Amino acid sequence: MNYDKTTTSTMESTFIKVCPNPQCDAVFHNCPKKETHCKDCGGNIMIINTDTYWKKFSNNWFQYDFATHDYYRPVKEK
């Protein structure tokens, strides 16, 4: 299947990424794969999967939408 450039840019995958710095602990949602630095402390951020998010990071206070930097707190579907 062929996609033009406008289609692929709108279909860009987004990820959940966390900052491993214990003094920062930021969690970024809807983060593009190419982004590698934390907006809070400037450190490196890493991709985590959804299961890891719900087990270890879902109660973190510092969760943001990467694009808007607004607080973002997803609700787990049952």
Image (spheres, rainbow, N blue to C red):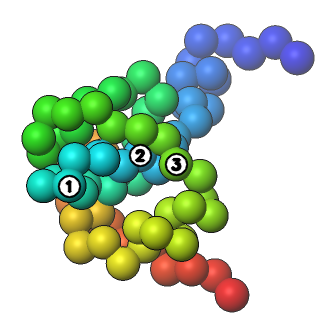
Q: Amino acid at mark 2?
A: Lys
Q: Amino acid at mark 3?
A: Ile
Q: Quadrant of the C terminus?
A: bottom right
Residue appearing at x 48%, y 41% in the figure: 47
Whole-number angstrom distance, CA of label 3 to CA of label 1? 16 Å
Q: State the image coordinates of residue 38 (x, y, percent, origin top left).
A: 22, 38
Q: Quadrant of the N terminus?
A: top right
The nearer-to-camera label among 3 and 1 is 1
Up-down relation of residue 12 to residue 77 (above or below):
above
Residue appearing at x 24%, y 73% in the figure: 61
Residue denoted by label 2: 17
Q: Residue furthest bottom?
A: 78
Whole-number angstrom distance, CA of label 1 to CA of label 2? 15 Å
Residue denoted by label 3: 48
For numbered disc 1, what is the local secondary structure?
Answer: loop
Q: Are marks 1 and 2 in contact (CB under 8 Å)?
A: no
Badge 1: residue crowd in 10 Å (few <14, some 14–19, many ≥20): few
Q: State the image coordinates of residue 56 (x, y, percent, origin top left).
A: 46, 69
Q: Amino acid at mark 1?
A: Pro
Q: Nearer the viewer, residue 64 or 6?
A: 64
Up-down relation of residue 34 to residue 51 (above or below):
above
Residue appearing at x 29%, y 46% in the figure: 19
Q: Is residue 45 left or right of residue 6?
A: left
Up-down relation of residue 69 to residue 46 (above or below):
below
Up-down relation of residue 19 to residue 63 (above or below):
above
For numbered disc 3, what is the local secondary structure?
Answer: strand
Sequence-wise first label, 3 or 1? 1
In this view of the protein, can residue 6 be seen by the observer?
Answer: yes
Whole-number angstrom distance, CA of label 2 to CA of label 3? 6 Å
Q: Are marks 2 and 3 in contact (CB under 8 Å)?
A: yes
As drawn, the label of residue 22 is: 1
Q: Nearer the viewer, residue 16 or 2?
A: 16
